[in-house]
Amino acid sequence: DGFSAARLFSQGVSYTYDDVIFLPGFIDFPADAVDLSTRLSRRVPLSIPCVASPMDTVSEAAMAAAMASLGGVAVVHSNTEPRAQASIVRAAKSRRLPFVSSVPIFSPAPVSEYMRPAPRSASASFDFEQAAALLADEGLDYAPLVSEEGEVIDLITSKDVERIRSYPKLGKPSLGADGKFVVAASIGTREDDKRRLEQLIQAGANAIVIDSSQGNSTYQLDMIKYAKKTFPEVDLIGGNVVTIGQAQNLIAAGVDGLRVGMGSGSICTTQEVCAVGRGQATAVYKVASYAKDHNVPVIADGGISYSGHIVKALSLGASTVMMGSFLAGSHEAPGAYEYKDGHRVKKYRGMGSLEAMTKGSDARYLGDTLKLKVAQGVVGAVADKGSVLRFIPYTMQAVKQGFQDLGASSLQSAHDLLRAETLRLEVRTGAAQVEGGIHGLVSYEKKSF
Ligand code: XMP
């Protein structure tokens, strides 16, 4: 019944996630038993398949600490000076708590009148439970978080403890061989990105993403060769690609991971502006089926609006999903909340928007020294979603339920079902898509958890 992915995706049609639907399989395990552990790249394991996109309205220190504490990872964006980007990586890696607050720094003069001279402090190496126990045991409202070098890096308050206790229990965090949070970072392909790369590696970045909208270029191949030769110990992720041909070149050059997607992002206009790209379901399936034979994990980048899209991306062969808009309205995304038409929102912008390109991200879209800048993205806003520490666990529970319906008890088992052609799917007509969404109601309240 239904079609195999191999047959469905070989008919000259570009499909997005919404175009396709899986047929249910056989369930012989509870949803909680589904194992979502995976790899970002060859040597970077994760316990959940979630990656925050290298965008300046998504991934800075707070997102990186939160994603790592959930078992995922964030890729710190490079739309800033190399030194500033490296210090964001350091900030996220300097703690074991799932949050980063910005502590205002003052000189001792006015502060000494109000504060105790040597308040009880918590070590930056404390995890959440250790820090919470310190506050509770000593009856403290707050404690400064102090690094090994004796520097105050943050503050933990009893309010933080209360807030985080109200979220689902944290699972296994992403920790590197150094015992610190796993944090990735992006670079471009210009000559001065070699210096950026060095600074990021010194800051402890566990993986480097070469950020380009069309990764199959001499610029990227040169950077891959340079980075693999100079820093062979760090995983290198290439992209973006959407075809087997592009993937072949980057894999041959030595990448440890591939980022897949062109024009599928919510803020992207690449397909409209450049007429190049591919439907994301087709792109993920094609590239992943090739990359699997070379043991190169695939990141399905862009176009994730809800948990079903994550189930589709992973079942079509991806090892992780990279998300921008899904995370941009969170408490952990950079920037302050604003009010628009009565809604609490956060700004979210494409890195190819004119506004972002004035800060330097034009390298991702232009790759060379073009003087006239044409936007390939827009500036927008997304609704407040609260903390990723709350909504990502619920999203992962929904993904587990999807895997259970498919009869896949792990990512590996989903990939095996795909390969064995046991996983069956079909294309949805326009009417089937309408039927599959909420319809026929005069009004409704959309609350998922
Ligand atoms: P989502 O759908 O998660 O997509 O918001 C995030 C991904 O979109 C890509 N990206 C862009 N693509 N113009 C583009 O064509 C842009 O300005 C732009 N900014 C980001 C990127 O791959 C990101 O991870």
Image: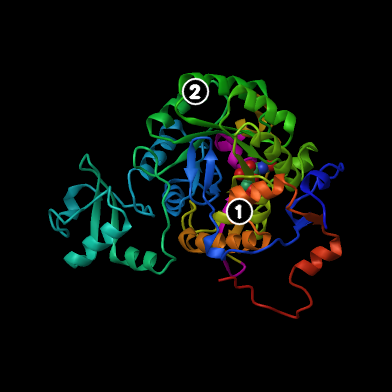
| Residue at image coords 43%, 57% | 171
- Local packing at callout 1 (Cα closer than 10 Å; few below 14, some 14-19, many 20+) is many
Give the side of residue 77 with respect to residue 87, left or right: right
Q: Secondary structure at mark 2?
A: helix
> Residue 102: x, y in percent?
36, 52
The secondary element bearing badge 1 is classed as helix
Left or right relative to 384: residue 175: left
User: Which residue is pictured at 51% across the width and 25% down the height?
Assistant: 193
Question: Amino acid type of disc 1?
Answer: Ser
Q: For residue 420: magenta?
A: no
Magenta span: 341-362
Per the image, the residue denoted by label 2 is 194
Does ligand 1 reach within 8 Å of label 1's beta carbon? yes
In screen coordinates, is 391 left or right of 262? left
The quarter of the rendered structure image containing the N terminus is bottom right
Tag 2 near tag 1, CB within 8 Å? no
**Quadrant, the C terminus:** bottom right
Can the viewer see residue 353 in this picture?
A: no
In the foreground, 82 or 236: 236
Q: Label 2 to label 1, Cα distance in Å?
A: 29 Å
In the picture as drawn, the residue positioned furthest to the front comes out as 28
**Residue under pointer 1:** 325
Residue 223 versus residue 164 in the image, above or below: above
Neighbours of disc 2 within 10 Å: few (<14), some (14-19), many (20+): some
